[in-house]
């Protein structure tokens, strides 16, 4: 057995199911070894960045890492954006790169660069295999680190000469550990703070979409009635139809849900990650009492000083609080009237233009209302990055965790098309809808071929405005105008047909729901393109500027 054979065996032992990538000369041995595997499927992509985004979405949906693979030099640099996105969005991932022979890494050499050092800032760990005997330890550590809270990316580099060396080792068995749980004393302190509050509010972050955490959070809210504001990546942690769901927080401008934080005397952050929504946006004057509940201690920030930190397994922490609620004969006495006013006011916002069937340009609110109508509770929507992401975050609400996937840490454009492919692989029986701007979609348009080759059951919707709309929105907000951000687009239906996709163009709002429903039920991949009315961007800005918080 050679080193590359052992590496594949270790990946099999870890339960890795998929590796996405573009192979090169320097990982040829690994690819030949991987070809013999009956447990791991290799998905050939058209660009390494697409491979990384596919591995990210697999990790977000399953909680287990997939691999993304590239060769040395340009193959590795092509991976890095998707890897950084996965790491900052807290998705487990294995990054597998080839490298030139170890005998030439000390000097100038063809395509050679220090890949490990380049990846260190965007991974939890990055390392090179120098000795075949270390492969079992390295691969066990890599997967364990990738899955451990907070999950992220790990890079393992295999030089081409090391891959060929003989080795007589076996994979280490996978032994999972139970996460630590908080002490009873700290839970008692947290419970006392909760009991003493009059207007508590919950900010639920990315950690709450873990299945067990979501279940315990819902039980906690059913018992207390406390309202939940979800960050973009926590959508679905509570059901959109629950009376305590106050929808989504995180727009750069102050939005209606932020009023619930203004009125609160205790902010309970659960699984909160400040890469999504910085505390200066909701605690800029440092006046809020904060109760921090998470897998890890609080990040240090001048606007985030929790009085109490409950550190440990999130689901277990919530279970311990639920136990205390059950055993406490005195009921909680919260004043949550204002939170219900927030929910009612946001519900009115969702209804705005949701039935607009008269326009030739289609408003974002109408698109997302129709999308929610045709998508089931467990179907999955993925958002790319652009102005559409803000509308999706605000207007597309969820029944279940992990049914709306938004990149909101690193926020890379080009995410949705490859991500939608991966989601369709994980859940081939669900409706999978990716929404892109015309800018982001073309950044990884080559993966249309991958989707067709795999015959993915998926739909991509492109909001066409002929420019970088989000940048225009932000520049106009600050400067009253924007720079030249316009570009031209292809004939979308011809583009779809050239890749073997079904192609649809919707030019009138009344046609949208029917076309979208048909596309979602077509065999293979479908493209739906529509002219989006981004005049609504500035209308929303003006409306929020005049907003008064409900009392």
Image (cartoon, rainbow, N blue to C red):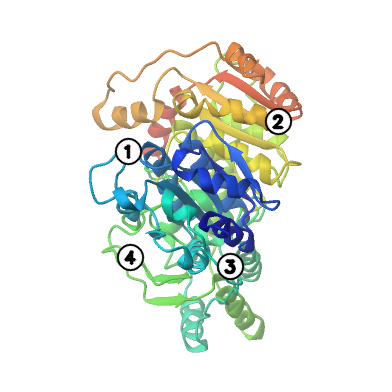
Q: CA distance from mark 1 to mark 3?
A: 31 Å
Q: Earlier in the sequence, mark 1 or mark 3?
A: 1
- Which is more foreground, mark 1 or mark 4? 1
Q: Secondary structure at mark 3?
A: loop
Q: Residue at x 48, y 33 (%)?
A: 47
Pick whichever of labels 4 and 2 is earlier in the sequence. 4
Q: Which residue is mark 2?
A: 455
Q: Residues within 10 Å of mark 4 (few under 14, many from 20)?
A: many
Q: Earlier in the sequence, mark 1 or mark 4?
A: 1
Image height of 320 relative to 352, above or below:
below
Q: Residue at x 60, y 11 (%)?
A: 494
Element marked by disc 2: loop
Residue count near mark 2 (Cα–Cα under 10 Å), binned few <14, some 14–19, many ≥20: some
Query: On residue 111, which mark appears?
Result: 1
**Residue at x-position 35% and y-position 40%:** 73
Residue 510 position, x and y percent, is 67, 18
Q: Is residue 263 above or below residue 25?
A: below
Residue at disc 4, secondary structure: loop
- On the image, the x and y values in percent for residue 143 come to 52, 63
Residue underneath mark 4: 304
Q: Which mark is residue 171?
A: 3
Label 4 and label 3: CA atoms lie apart by 43 Å
Front of the two marks 1 and 2? 1
Place of residue 375 in the rendered image (x, y in percent of width and height, measured from the top left): 70, 38
């Amino acid at each position: 057995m050679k080193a590359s054979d052992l590496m594949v065996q270790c990946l099999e032992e870890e339960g890795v199911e998929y590796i996405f990538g573009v192979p090169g000369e320097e990982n040829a041995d690994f690819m030949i070894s991987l070809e013999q595997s009956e447990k791991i499927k290799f998905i050939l992509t058209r660009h390494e960045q697409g491979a990384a985004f596919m591995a990210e979405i697999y990790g977000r949906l399953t909680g287990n890492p997939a691999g993304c693979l590239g060769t040395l030099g340009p193959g590795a640099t092509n991976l890095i954006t998707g890897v950084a996105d996965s790491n900052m969005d807290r998705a487990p991932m294995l990054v597998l790169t080839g490298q030139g022979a170890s005998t030439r890494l000390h000097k100038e050499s063809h395509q050679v660069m220090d890949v490990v050092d380049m990846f260190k800032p965007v991974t939890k760990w990055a390392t090179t295999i120098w000795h075949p005997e270390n492969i079992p330890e390295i691969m066990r550590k890599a997967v364990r680190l990738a899955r451990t809270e907070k999950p992220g990316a790990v890079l393992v580099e295999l030089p081409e000469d090391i891959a060929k060396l003989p080795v007589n080792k076996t994979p280490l068995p996978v032994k999972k550990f139970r996460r630590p749980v908080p002490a009873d004393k700290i839970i008692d302190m947290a419970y006392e703070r909760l009991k003493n509050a009059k207007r508590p509010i919950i900010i639920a972050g990315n950690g709450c979409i873990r299945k067990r955490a979501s279940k315990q959070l819902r039980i906690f809210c059913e018992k207390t009635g406390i309202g939940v504001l979800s960050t973009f990546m926590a959508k679905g942690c509570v059901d959109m139809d629950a009376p305590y769901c106050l929808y989504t927080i995180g727009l750069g401008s102050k939005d209606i849900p932020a009023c619930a934080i203004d009125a609160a005397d205790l902010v309970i952050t659960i699984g909160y990650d400040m890469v999504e929504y910085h505390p200066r946006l909701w605690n800029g004057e440092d006046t809020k009492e904060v109760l921090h509940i998470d897998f890890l201690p609080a990040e240090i920030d001048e606007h985030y000083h929790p009085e109490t930190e409950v550190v440990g397994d999130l689901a277990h922490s919530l279970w311990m609080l639920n136990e205390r609620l059950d055993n406490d004969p005195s009921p909680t006495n919260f004043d949550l009237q204002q939170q219900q006013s927030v929910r009612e006011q946001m519900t009115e916002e969702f209804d705005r233009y949701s039935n607009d069937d008269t326009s030739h340009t289609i408003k974002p609110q109408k698109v997302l209302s129709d999308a929610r109508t045709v998508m089931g509770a467990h179907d999955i929507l993925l958002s790319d990055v652009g102005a559409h992401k803000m509308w999706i975050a605000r207007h597309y609400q969820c029944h279940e965790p992990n049914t709306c996937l938004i990149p909101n840490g690193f926020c890379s454009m080009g995410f949705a098309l490859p991500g939608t492919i991966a989601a369709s692989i994980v859940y081939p029986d669900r409706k999978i809808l990716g929404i892109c701007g015309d800018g982001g979609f073309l950044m990884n348009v080559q993966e249309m071929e991958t989707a067709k080759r795999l015959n993915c059951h998926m739909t991509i919707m492109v909001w066409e405005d002929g420019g970088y709309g989000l940048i225009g929105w932000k520049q106009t907000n600050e400067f009253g105008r924007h720079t030249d951000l316009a570009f031209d687009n292809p004939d979308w239906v011809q583009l779809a047909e050239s890749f073997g996709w079904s192609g649809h163009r919707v030019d009138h709002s009344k046609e949208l729901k029917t076309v979208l429903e048909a596309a979602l039920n077509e065999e293979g991949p479908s493209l739906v393109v529509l002219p989006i009315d981004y005049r609504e961007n500035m209308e929303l800005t003006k409306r929020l500027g005049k907003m008064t918080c409900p009392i």
